Amino acid sequence: MKTVLLMAVLLFSPLSFAQSLYQQLGEQQGIETIVEEMLYRVGGDERIAHHFDGVDIMRVHKLISEQVCDLSGGPCDYSGEDMKTSHRNMGVDNADFNALVEHLIAAMEKEDVPVSAQNQLLGVLAPMHGDIVEE
Ligand code: HEM
């Protein structure tokens, strides 16, 4: 009886309903949609679109989706380059970085990602700033 009670308490405790960041981003499908929407907006932003001239955007979409899935606790292993290597000599500055983050937030808003989950993802990406921004 005690065990049954304990199980019932665990089952209905708020903890049981806590979702991982990966789940809150909508898992694989949600993440791919968010990254697609972000890259679409980046492509239309004249402040930063030039950085992507001649870039294989399907490949970048696949890699960023994989990276976000990996970092948010999903069942993925990021297979791309590290952030310092992949952004070397690109001349990305603070404003460029902020512009991309702006599009990421807009994409998450569009997909109805809760604000707390948005902030969690931004918190995971923020430490990459130093490896991506060069100026
Ligand atoms: C939190 C911010 C960012 C994240 C998480 C991120 C992530 C990535 C990833 C995973 C790749 C693929 C790496 C590889 O090639 O193996 C990539 C490539 C790239 N990123 Fe970023 N990035 C960020 C910010 C930026 C910014 C601000 C810009 C410029 C405005 C930028 C421009 C590019 C470009 C042009 C490539 C393609 C490089 C190539 O294929 O030659 N990224 N990024």
Image (cartoon, grey):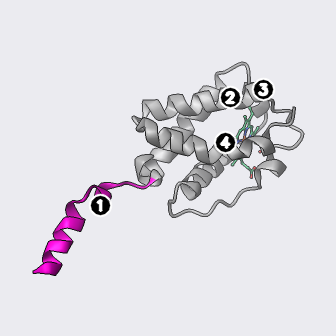
As drawn, the residue found furthest toward the left would be 1
Residue extending furthest right?
A: 89
Mark 2 burial class by Cα count in 10 Å: few <14, some 14-19, many 20+: few
Inspect the magenta stretch and tell me whether residue 68 lies in it. no
Q: CA distance from mark 4 to mark 3?
A: 23 Å
The residue that disc 1 covers is 16
Q: Residues within 10 Å of mark 3 (few under 14, many from 20)?
A: few
Determine the main secondary structure of the stretch shown in magenta. Answer: helix
Along the polypeptide, which appears first: circle 4 or circle 3? 3
Label 4, on which residue?
126
Mark carried by residue 50: 3
Choose between 77 and 121: the one closer to the eye: 121
Query: In the rendering, which numbered label is found on residue 117?
Result: none
Q: Mark 1 is on which residue type?
A: Ser
Residue 7, percent across and down? 20, 72
Amino acid residing under circle 4: Ala
Label 1 sits on a secondary structure element that is: helix
- Describe residue 24's horizontal placement relative to residue 8 as left or right: right
Q: How many residues crowd around disc 1 within 10 Å: few (fewer than 14), some, or many (20 or more)?
A: few
Nearest to N terminus: mark 3 or mark 2: 3
Q: Which of pointers 3 and 1 indicates the residue nearer the eye?
A: 1
Q: Which residue is mark 2?
A: 98
Residue 61 appears in view: no
- Seen at 61% across and 50% down, the residue is 62
Does any atom of ligand 1 lie closer than 8 Å to the CB of label 3? Answer: no
Q: Amino acid at mark 2?
A: Asn
**Up/down of 135 relative to 73, above or below:** above
* Residues drawn in magenta: 1-20
- Circle 3 or circle 2, nearest the eye: 2
Tell whether 55 sits left or right of 122.
right
User: Is 16 positioned to the left or the right of 123 in the image?
Assistant: left
